[in-house]
Amino acid sequence: MAVATVASPTTDSAHTMTVLDPACGDGRLLVAAAERLRATGHTVHTIGVDIDPTLTHPEGVDEFICADALDIDWSAVLPGGCADVVVGNPPFRSPLPRGQNTTSAPTADTGPYGDLALAFIDLSMTLVRPEGRVVLVLPTSVLASRDAGRVRRRAEQRAVLDTWWWHPDRVFDAHVDVCVLGFTAGSAPRTVPGSPVWSHVVTSSVGVPDLGTFTVDGTLGDRCRVSANFRDEYYALVDAVVPSAGATPTRERPALVTSGVIDPWQCHWGERPVRFAGQRVQAPVVDRSRLTGRFVAWAERLLVPKVLVAAQTRTVEAVADVDGVWLPGVPVVSVIPTDSPEVDVHQVAAVLTSSVATVWAWHQRAGTGLSATSFRLSPAAVADMPWPAGDLTAAVKACEAGDIDAGRRAADAAFGVDARTSDIFTVFMASLVTRRRT
């Protein structure tokens, strides 16, 4: 694990270093950074900015400005228009409120669930001088979430993420998991293809093995339609979910399947109670006669053979609904094979059950889960999963027989994973004790 520090940028010994915190609060982080730099012989001038009108000038801060850092004329504040070091523990708030950004501040053009902290990453990268340092305390959601992708890309165009800190426990006074990211600004913009992720901040600390090389034939999304339900579908189901009273699920009264009853290749509907709408229900079904409006067609579209994938998990957990008599709860992901006769639900479930899928998901999605050691699988993430170039017959056969470990190894072999890597993957998968969800 690398540890983020306020390392001294390369400066002339006579140069007065400007250290900025654009959301300084009581100033303790800014003062601590300045003390560390002064201890190494630097002359430091600190500038703290905070929007809170109740704050007084923080002790130990040379210059304090009460203002919104995202809406300020920085050319009038910073000598030369930039700072040598930018530090901060910016506010976390998701989603980013509409209207938060202004024309005078860098905009964090995120998706609908982008955290306010993303705007401060953008701002910091704009204000730091070439070869300067940016060190920020951030929610771990910035590491891999889709809505932070454009901000990560812009940050990498301007700087290199070279130090970091992360811990699975919540050691900060925050109700979210956090990390500390340290960047060194470049002297010129870099070309950064695609949407980079910073999940290595987590995976390097929890022992996730490298993916290595494997053989693929496109993605799961090339062969399937992937979707998930959200708030509207949840509320549409509230009045339609009823106990099954022991009846077998049918298309007219399909089973409500939530993440908590999904295990690899197994659905425990009827065996485990489901928590829905604040209640625990044993074997709940959806009375389709109670659905109204567009949700009638929504249920019809989903009542087909498909694979359901738990959304919050430590391993990818997927199960095939061969008969098309399950309706997914929120936020279970549905994977429906297209009309191609070459792909069926058993093959899709085998690919998702593979060790490759879980290791891939950790590298792509670490930091996005509700807990520090889980990840959230969005429909886009599931669609992006690789599809193996090899044959899946042995993997399907083993999983159908209930030998999930053998099925994983066979699916990994279809990806071209060698025996040594397969052993490493097996040990890693065994270390992931799945937390029950409902």
Image (cartoon, rainbow, N blue to C red):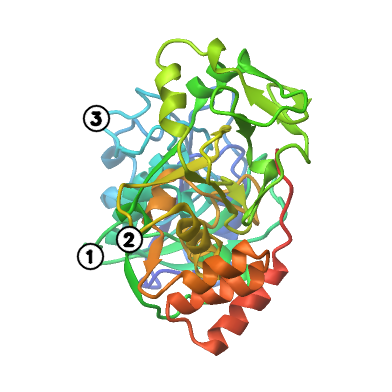
Quarter of the image that includes the N terminus = bottom right
Q: Residues within 10 Å of mark 1 (few under 14, many from 20)?
A: some
Residue identified by numbered label 2: 156
Residue 27 position by quadrant? top right
Query: Which type of secondary structure does the marked residue at label 3 adopt?
Result: loop
Type of the residue with mark 2: Glu
Query: Which type of secondary structure does the marked residue at label 1 adopt?
Result: loop
Q: Earlier in the sequence, mark 1 or mark 3?
A: 3
Q: Residues within 10 Å of mark 2 (few under 14, many from 20)?
A: many
Q: From this viewpoint, is residue 55 visible? A: yes
Question: Do the residues bearing badges 1 and 2 touch, measured as CB atoms within 8 Å?
Answer: yes
Q: Nearer the viewer, mark 2 or mark 3?
A: 2
Residue identified by numbered label 3: 103
> Residue at the spot x=47%, y=52% of the render?
345
Q: Which mark is residue 190?
A: 1
Type of the residue with mark 3: Thr
Work out how far the residue at label 1 is from the one at label 3, CA to CA, in angstroms.
24 Å
Work out how far the residue at label 1 is from the one at label 2, CA to CA, in angstroms.
7 Å
